[in-house]
């Protein structure tokens, strides 16, 4: 004997639709330090070139890889290994103070907007937009201790582009065409961009982006066209920084210097 249960369509409950949400974050802190007290040295960042230590396919990519603080190997960060120690000696308070001032003592903030979020645990498709924004009335951004205050209101000033991303295991991951990066050296704010940048960070429904990782290339051309009266030549940059990304046809010269950084970003409100 069999029984058939009838379902009355008029009483069936439709599934609750998922309404995608948008979260806006402002870059609050950056950590570019390389820990060379251990071997191999530890650094934030990514494996940007897919090459292994000692790979000589291109002479200019012959750079020593580092290890991420969480254990991943193959991390590329020539800027942190070779350039930052030099800048650290030039900047009052060191490079950490230079970056803090570039983030806090300014009227312009770097904002990361993540839209189309269906889940903060696992979402295979979100949109990540990078933009510049400013507090109303030309005020300085609002600081809170070592970073920026969360919840501050900002006006968009420049759209820097958007790209696709995903959330996997509570972590946002995305590749960006470029991400702004600033340093204050001898009273001058140096503005660069991390090209072909990669980003990842822990994300939650109501909180900040935490334990973030950034990686990308600072172009030699950007360093040559600097804000100082006397900019370094390509030859000086190749000697000092040993560019390791984007080899030319001969493989003897690279157009980019790898850089890695850790970051935190707090929530913000765009008007």
Image (cartoon, rainbow, N blue to C red):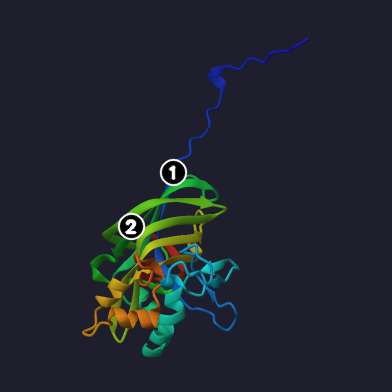
Looking at the rendering, which quadrant does residue 241 occupy?
Answer: bottom left
For the N terminus, give its image quadrant. Answer: top right
Callout 2: few (<14), some (14-19), or many (20+) C-alpha neighbours within 10 Å? some
Of the numbered discs 2 and 1, the one sitting upstream in the chain is: 1
Left or right relative to 123: residue 255: left
- Above or below residue 18? Residue 237 is below
**Which residue matches tag 1?**
20
Q: Residue at x 44, y 61 (%)?
A: 198
CB under 8 Å between discs 2 and 1: no
Secondary structure beneath dot 2 equals strand
Where is residue 83? Give x, y as percent: 40, 81
Q: Which of 142 and 195 is in front in this view?
A: 195
**Can you see residue 160?**
yes
Q: Residue furthest left?
A: 229
Which quarter of the figure is the C terminus placed in?
Answer: bottom left
Within-10-Å neighbours for mark 1: few <14, some 14–19, many 20+ = few
Residue 76 location (% of width, % of height): 48, 70
Q: Residue furthest front?
A: 250
Compare residues 27 and 237 and report the one nearer the observer: 237
SS for callout 1: loop
Which one is closest to the eye, mark 2 or mark 1?
A: 1
Q: Which of 102 and 5 is in front in this view?
A: 102
Q: How far apart are marks 2 and 1 (CA)?
A: 18 Å
Say above or below: 62 vs 129: below
Q: Position of residue 33 (x, y in %)?
A: 48, 78
**x and y, in percent, of residue 170 in the image:** 55, 54
Q: In which quarter of the image is residue 61?
A: bottom left
Q: Is residue 141 left or right of residue 84?
A: left
Q: Which mark is residue 270?
A: 2
Residue located 34% across and 78% down the image = 183
- Left or right: 39 in relation to 262: right
Residue furthest right as drawn? 1
């Amino acid at each position: 004997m069999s029984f058939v249960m009838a379902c009355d369509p008029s009483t069936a409950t439709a599934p609750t639709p998922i309404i995608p949400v948008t979260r806006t974050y402002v870059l609050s802190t950056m950590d570019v330090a390389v820990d060379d007290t251990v071997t191999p040295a530890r650094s934030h960042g990514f494996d940007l070139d897919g090459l292994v230590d000692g790979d000589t396919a291109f002479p200019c990519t012959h750079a020593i890889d580092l290890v991420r603080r969480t254990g991943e190997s193959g991390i590329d960060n020539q800027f942190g290994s070779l350039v930052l120690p030099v800048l650290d000696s030039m900047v009052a308070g060191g490079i950490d103070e230079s970056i803090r001032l570039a983030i806090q003592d300014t009227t312009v903030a770097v904002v990361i907007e993540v839209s189309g979020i269906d889940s903060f645990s696992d979402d295979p498709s979100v949109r990540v937009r990078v933009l510049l924004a400013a507090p109303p009335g030309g005020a300085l951004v609002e600081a809170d201790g070592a970073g920026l205050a969360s919840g501050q209101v900002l006006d968009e000033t420049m759209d820097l582009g958007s790209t696709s991303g995903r959330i996997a295991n509570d972590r946002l991951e995305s590749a960006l065409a470029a991400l702004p990066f600033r340093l204050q050296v001898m009273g001058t704010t140096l503005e660069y961009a991390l090209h072909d940048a990669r980003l990842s960070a822990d994300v939650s429904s109501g909180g900040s982006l935490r334990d973030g990782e950034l990686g990308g290339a600072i172009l030699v051309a950007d360093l040559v066209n600097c804000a100082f009266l006397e900019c370094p030549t390509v030859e000086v940059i190749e000697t000092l920084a040993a560019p390791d990304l984007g080899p030319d046809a001969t493989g003897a010269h690279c157009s980019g210097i790898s850089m890695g950084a850790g970051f935190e970003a707090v929530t913000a409100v765009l008007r």
